[in-house]
Image (cartoon, rainbow, N blue to C red):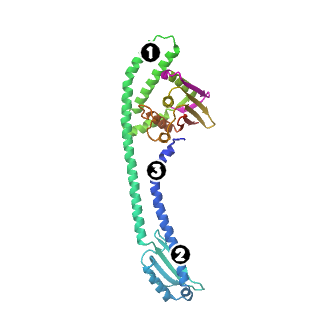
Amino acid sequence: MTQSVNNGLLIGKRIFPFIVSVLSIVWVLLFLRLYLTHSAHQFATDFKRQNYSELAVSDIFSLSTRINALSGAVPWSCVEIRRGSKVFLTRQEGKCGWGLWSEPVQVQGDGQDPVTVDITFVLQRDLVRGAVVFIALQLLVLLSLYMSARQLERERNAGMVNLGQLAAQVAHDIRSPLQALQVVAGGLETSDSQVRELLTGAIDRIRSIAEGLLSEYRIVTPADFKRSAKKTISAQVDVGVEELITALVEEKKHEWGRPGLELQLLLSPDLVVRVPRLPLLRVVSNILNNAKEAIEGDGCIVVKASQSARAVFIEVTDSGKGIPPDILKKLGKQRVTAGKEGGNGLGMSYVYEQVALWGAQISVKSKVGVGTTVRLEFRK
């Protein structure tokens, strides 16, 4: 099972109800138009067959009588009986010629100087009323969908503002204890340079996250969010995949402290992706954390980086419990968690949002009891 995220799919889901309503209106108009055309030409054929002799001998009186009898049976708006340029009968109760609700037909006799009958048919009033009511209802549906979409957008923007203010407050408050931790780490006496580098790197990453949150969410209006998103996109740089993943995995090994959990790296050298470095680090970190939490007891996580002629791929595969199909299909659409205690779905929600923001793609394949593979694809 695979879930793919791209901007086209998100937009398509938003405009699908609008497309259905518009197509319904077009279908009704097309049906009525075809019905009118078919009925008018079918009647013209039957009228010529029934009045063939009158048309042949130019019996104007009989034809006029037949035309007058049509008033109660077939709706028409204009009738003209002529031979050559001479008009014998003209009756007009509405528009003559083609229109949205009208269809002209011509019945002509045989011979050198035949009689011609021009009739403009119209739709029955009940059909027209029904069509008008249906179209009006569809327009109301379209208006309702539009107003609902606007309301949801306003609520989403309001929620983003509140979330941004909260993130900025957290980032601001975390800087003081972080500074104290850095002072302690600087005075730590240890002969293990790897431990010191790991601790310093973790502190630097926390500081970068805090500063990034402050920079990104120092905003008060929805318009500021749009400007912030554009700024994030413009901050893209060339990131070395091997170096970033190797350092992150080393940090995770010490953080998790699980000897029975094996971490394998299959990284092609010299791979580069052009995205903001810190968000990419957070994305891969979230995916690794989910992989670890899906494994109960001993297990294995494989991180693979490769490329094709057109893209660079980062894959994280775990031997965990897998994601149930009903949760898998919701990934990228709403916050969901696969049974984690205290989980709220924020980690994968962030992953999907960032991947969509970069114009990249993400797919998730999972089988319960076997494991999960998360694949990121970055276009070159």
What's drawn in magenta, residue-wise?
Answer: 254-276
The image shows residue 330, relative to residue 34, as above or below, that is above
Q: Which mark is residue 185?
A: 1
- Residue at (41, 58) in percent of width and height: 138
Secondary structure, mark 2, is helix
- Image coords of residue 331 (percent x, y): 48, 39
Secondary structure, mark 1, is helix
Q: Which mark is residue 1?
A: none
Q: Quadrant of the N terminus?
A: top right
- Identify the residue position indicated by label 3 in the image: 15
In this rendering, would 303 be left or right of 190? Answer: right
Quarter residue 316 falls in: top right
**Is residue 281 visible from the viewing direction of this image?**
no
Q: CA distance from mark 1 to mark 2?
A: 93 Å
- Identify the residue position indicated by label 2 in the image: 42
- For the residue marked with disc 1, what is the amino acid? Ala
Which is nearer the eye, 98 or 308? 308
Q: CA distance from mark 3 to mark 1?
A: 54 Å
Upstream in sequence: badge 1 or badge 2: 2
- Image coords of residue 347 (percent x, y): 45, 33
